[in-house]
Image (cartoon, rainbow, N blue to C red):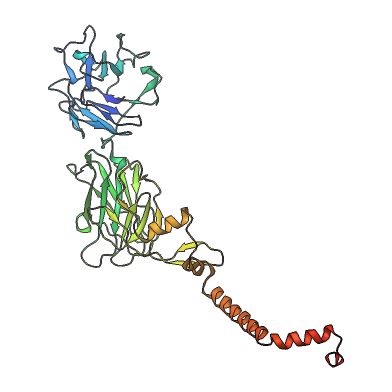
């Protein structure tokens, strides 16, 4: 779908762009798609200016967006228009075809603005555009009426459309050697620009929030990690508790590191596994997170397991990433997997299971009781003949037995 657009905006000649969005649940290969602009009186003709005739091999995943910039577009764009093509400030229709329009392509979506009515218009056009105004889709799914599906707004400094998908994947607050660092991860298949983004730590009683604005040419390639050392960011992660937050220039929170992590032991990192942050002894800078801490279990009289080791769980308050929909920054291994399996599946009863459930004290009393029963059994067996003799005398009313 055409999700957002802005024309040359009269005096803002370098801010023209069009945004496409995939609101479906499957990936879309844009290889043969065509983005075309149409003025009054024009027809589909290869000689007329198109915005983008050939997307080449470009796949848009579910929930992702792609921005196409005009010739002099100053923001962060993935694709550029063909040549000097541009949108008029009035009386245009933007058309997205699923194939080259001169090869029988079918219209996938269109947006019309101005005072001229086109045969391609969906419902009513947007009307005459205002200076500096962009238009964004507000109805999803659409009602197939441009005047209702889109609303005007004044955009701020442009940020990457997929910046909100970035995650803070690992923090090292108290290194055993070297300096502190944190790691960002891009789980998408597209490069994400860091321009107009900043990352900040939590404010304390002694100092205000400290932020690091990313360079305008900073980017994070698709499905990759990147380390940011303390010497670069000047952000100090407190050993007694802290957290990080990623913002855009309008101070909109994009993601965080799960809130206050509390006391940090030396040489361990706080790493993201699925939607949870856990302390782990395995440091994995610029690589997939690995969980290696040992989980110990203590058992109360009620057989429920508690995590008592350093494997503290901190759930992200803003960003939750389901491992089934996006590549997770790491997978929990070893003891943690065993604990999850024990909580979700029924295991055969073994001696170790009994020991874990009953506990050491209960087992000790059980052994004492068993010993008493064995002694009583042996006494009964040892005096069995004498007891039988007494019993027989009582049956025959023997006077000596009565005595």
Image height of 67 relative to 86, above or below = below
> Is residue 200 left or right of 73 when viewed as pictured?
right
Residue 233 drawn above or below residue 322:
below
Q: How many numbered badges does the structure rendering display?
A: 0
Q: Nearer the viewer, residue 294 or 241?
A: 294
Residue 293 lies, in percent from the top left, at: 34, 63
Left or right? Give the position of 54 relative to 343.
left
Q: Nearer the viewer, residue 4 or 292?
A: 292
Image coordinates for residue 288, horizontal then vertical, percent? 26, 52
Q: Can see residue 132? A: no
Is residue 162 in sight in this rendering? yes
| Left or right: 403 in relation to 219 | right
* Place of residue 52 in the rendered image (x, y in percent of width and height, measured from the top left): 18, 22
Residue pictured at 15% horizontal, 28% vertical: 72
Asked if residue 15 lies left or right of residue 122, the reply is left
Q: Which residue is drawn at 51% across and 67% down?
A: 354
Query: Residue sitting at 47 percent across and 58 percent down?
Result: 347
Q: As displayed, is residue 141 above or below residue 373? A: above
Residue occupying the far left of the picture:
83
Q: Which of 291 and 193 is in front in this view?
A: 291
In this rendering, the answer to whether 272 lies above or below 307 is above
Q: Toward which corner of the image does residue 302 lie, by quadrant? A: bottom right
Of residues 183 and 293, which is closer to you in this image? 293
Image x and y of residue 282, in percent: 28, 61
Question: Which quadrant: the N terminus?
Answer: top left
Q: Quadrant of residue 384?
A: bottom right
Check the picture and name the quadrant holding the C terminus: bottom right
Residue found farthest to the top: 41
């Amino acid at each position: 779908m055409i999700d957002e657009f802005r024309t040359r905006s009269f005096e803002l000649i370098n801010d023209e762009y069009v945004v496409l969005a995939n609101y479906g649940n499957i990936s879309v290969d844009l290889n043969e798609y065509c983005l075309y602009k149409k003025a009054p009186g024009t027809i589909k003709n290869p000689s007329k200016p198109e915005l983008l005739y050939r997307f080449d091999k470009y796949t848009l995943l579910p929930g992702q967006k792609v921005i196409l910039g005009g010739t002099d577009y100053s923001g962060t764009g993935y694709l550029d228009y063909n040549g000097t093509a541009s949108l008029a400030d009035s009386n245009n229709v933007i058309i997205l075809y699923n194939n080259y329009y001169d090869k029988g392509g079918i219209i996938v979506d269109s947006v019309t603005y101005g005072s001229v009515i086109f045969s391609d218009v969906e419902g009513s056009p947007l009307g005459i555009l205002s200076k500096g105004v962009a238009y964004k889709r507000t109805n999803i799914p659409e009602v197939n009426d441009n005047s209702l599906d889109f609303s005007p707004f004044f955009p701020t400094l442009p940020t990457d459309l997929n910046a909100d998908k970035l995650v803070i994947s690992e923090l090292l607050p108290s290194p055993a050697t070297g300096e502190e660092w944190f790691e960002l991860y891009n789980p998408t298949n597209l490069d994400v620009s860091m321009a107009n983004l900043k990352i900040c730590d939590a404010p304390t009683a002694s100092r205000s929030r400290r932020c690091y604005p990313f360079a305008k040419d900073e980017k994070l390639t698709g499905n990759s990690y990147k380390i940011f050392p303390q010497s670069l960011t000047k952000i100090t992660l407190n050993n007694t508790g802290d957290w990080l937050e990623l913002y855009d220039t309008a101070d909109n929170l994009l993601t965080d590191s799960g809130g206050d992590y509390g006391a940090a032991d030396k040489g361990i990192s706080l790493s993201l596994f699925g939607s949870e942050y856990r302390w782990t002894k395995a440091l994995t800078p610029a690589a997939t997170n690995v969980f290696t801490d040992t989980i110990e279990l203590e058992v109360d009289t009620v057989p429920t397991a508690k995590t008592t080791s350093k494997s503290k769980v901190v759930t992200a308050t803003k960003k939750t990433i389901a491992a089934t929909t996006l590549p997770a920054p790491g997978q929990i291994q070893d003891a943690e997997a065993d604990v999850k399996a024990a909580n979700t599946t029924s295991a055969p009863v073994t001696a170790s299971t009994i020991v874990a459930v009953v506990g050491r004290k209960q087992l000790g009393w059980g052994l004492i009781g068993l010993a008493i029963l064995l002694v009583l059994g042996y006494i009964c067996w040892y005096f069995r003949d004498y007891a039988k003799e007494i019993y027989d005398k009582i049956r025959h009313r023997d006077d000596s037995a009565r005595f």
